[in-house]
Image (tube, helix red, strand yellow):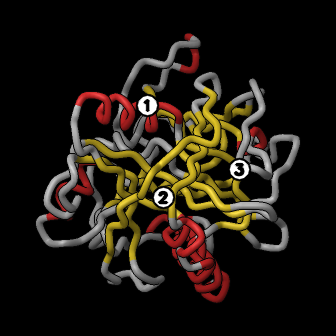
Amino acid sequence: MPSVTSGLPPLRFVRIKAYVNDLARLATLIALEGRRESLARRHTCLICWNTGESPVNRIEDNGTCCLVRTWTRRFLLTCSHVWNGFENFRSAHAGAQLWISSIADDLPLAPSFPLQVANPRLIAKEDGLDLATIDFDGINSIEAMRFFHFKPNPKPTARKGDIVHFLGYAGDAVREGKLNFVLNYCYSSQTIHDVGRIQFILHSEPGTMHHEDKNGTTIPPFRAGGESGAPVFKVRENLELELAGIVSKLCSSGLGSGESTPYEMSDGDVFITHACFVQDDGSLTAP
């Protein structure tokens, strides 16, 4: 059963007990899942914008992004529609500023510190893929452990039935957390339902998605808008994480009709663009 947790620090693994009887194996799975969440949290950032004041005080709008490094450069990876949202805001507001923020270290209760993105500029953008790569002044001064070491692959690595994990900054959760000076996020583990040439899909039948809040209490689905741009990781055979894709949109369960009605609740289908379109220098191949 897929699971989604909301808030910081999230408690998870309630449903694992239905699949694992051996306590030793259960303990190992819990430790591994916690490690995967910790790594996703390390490389995934809130990306947001406003008119110059700290996002601790006000966020105009937000998405999610990933800090990436290859053998040749560092860059920020997100959705093209997230970048377009910032560009539209910047064109209409003097003093517009772009920010990224993540927690200070791997501890669940670690504080977060927003970083103003100085002179943000596109490396590449492909609206057909809904991907954008961004450079900015001072990116090389950020500590190396923040960047996921991405090794471009010319072919998609996601396969139907693979379990993937992602962490996103849903706007409602972020705004709620600001009241307590906490950077809330939502963490999800799901099985790939189907794979296409450009994207793959996470889909759960109605009533099968298990949600928990930060206290481990079962909760109903919640608005998850703002998770666009989240890096999606799969676990390789050597148990290392691999960047499989980037969350593009959340939609209703309309797979049978071939439609994708806008629907930003956490129990909707998740459409993810393959990471194979991202190149070593931050350029993007055309779809």
**Where 211 falls versus 145 (above or below)?**
above
| Cα separation between marks 2 and 1 | 22 Å
Q: Is residue 186 visible?
A: no
Which residue is tagged 1? 84
Q: Bin the neighbour count of mark 3 within 10 Å (Cα to Cα): few under 14, some 14-19, many 20 and up.
A: many
Secondary element at image label 3: strand
As shown in the figure, which amino acid type bears the numbered disc 1?
Asn
Mark 3 or 1 closer to N-term?
Answer: 1
Q: Nearer the viewer, residue 251 or 155?
A: 155
**Disc 2 + disc 3, Cβ < 8 Å:** no
User: Between tags 3 and 1, which lies in front?
Assistant: 1
Q: Residue furthest bottom?
A: 24
Which residue is tagged 3? 244
Which residue is tagged 2? 167
| Cα separation between marks 3 and 1 | 23 Å
**Where 11 falls versus 231 (above or below)?**
below
As shown in the figure, which amino acid type bears the numbered disc 3?
Ala
Location of the C terminus by quadrant is top right
| Cα separation between marks 2 and 3 | 13 Å
Q: Position of residue 43 (x, y in %)?
A: 55, 67
Tell me where residue 149 sits by quadrant.
Answer: bottom right
Q: Bin the neighbour count of mark 2 within 10 Å (Cα to Cα): few under 14, some 14-19, many 20 and up.
A: many
How many marks are shown on the rendered structure? 3
